[in-house]
Image: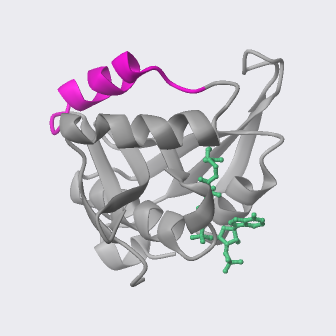
Amino acid sequence: MSAATLRQMTEDDLPAVMRIERSTFPFDAWSEGMLRGELADQPRTRHYIVAVAGEEIVGYAGLAAAGDQADVQTIAVSAPMQRVGVGSAMLKELLAEAVRRGATAVFLEVRADNPPAQAMYERFGFERIGLRRDYYDDGTDAVMMMRKLNSGVESANG
Ligand SMILES: CC(C)(COP(=O)(O)OP(=O)(O)OC[C@H]1O[C@@H](n2cnc3c(N)ncnc32)[C@H](O)[C@@H]1OP(=O)(O)O)[C@@H](O)C(=O)NCCC(=O)NCCS
């Protein structure tokens, strides 16, 4: 993927990250404080990355890991840069980090009305394991997905 390079997220990135957060999740954006809280736990239990194209942050993603389980906390790509592989590159990196941290399974929740994201997760081998009804503030269900990991980083490739 040559459209963007990946690096660890820092607090300095939060203004740019929040712009993407508010535009990609207009109804349930995280607050800057929530993201700050996530970064406060990095690297202990969190791994947050940004995707950079030229000078610009065009996407971000975060993983939470504890014991042998990990969760995809968030992932988003700015609208003009969607569908060119940035999301896949970031998800691949989160899965690789989960393997590095010894996780054997990665979980996530995705809105039932978000087929593009579900399609990406399915391409990466995530399977539906359940439904949380009325999970989001507007009453939308959450689809719970899980992918098992093997020990090799190669196995985390999409
Ligand atoms: C979901 C998201 C992160 C995907 O990022 P992306 O960079 O656009 O994804 P990629 O270009 O790597 O695409 C990977 C695969 O996802 C699926 N996909 C992505 N966008 C899609 C769309 N609009 N429609 C259908 N499938 C889509 C496809 O299977 C795609 O592979 P393909 O392009 O070879 O067909 C991005 O669309 C986004 O930021 N959406 C808004 C925020 C969001 O919904 N985040 C997920 C919350 S759980």
Find residue 90 and report its horizontal and vertical position in percent: 42, 62
The residue stretch that appears in magenta: 29-44
**Which image quadrant is residue 17 in?**
top left
> Residue shown at 72%/21% (left/top)?
136
Q: Quarter of the image holding residue 11?
A: top left
**Ligand 1 falls in which quarter?**
bottom right
Left or right position of 12 against 78: left
Q: Quadrant of residue 70?
A: top left
Q: How is the image coloured?
A: one colour
Please tell me how many numbered marks the rendered image carries. 0
- Residue 129, how many percent across, how many down? 71, 43
2 vs 8: above or below: below
54 to 41, vertically: above or below: below
**Residue drawn at x 29%, y 20% as measured from the top left:** 37
Based on the picture, tell me whether residue 42 belongs to the magenta stretch: yes
Give x and y (percent) for residue 69: 39, 41
* Residue visible at 57% across and 76% down in the picture: 84
Examine the rendering and report whether any part of residue 136 can be seen.
Answer: yes
Could you say which is closer to the camera, residue 89 or residue 25? 25
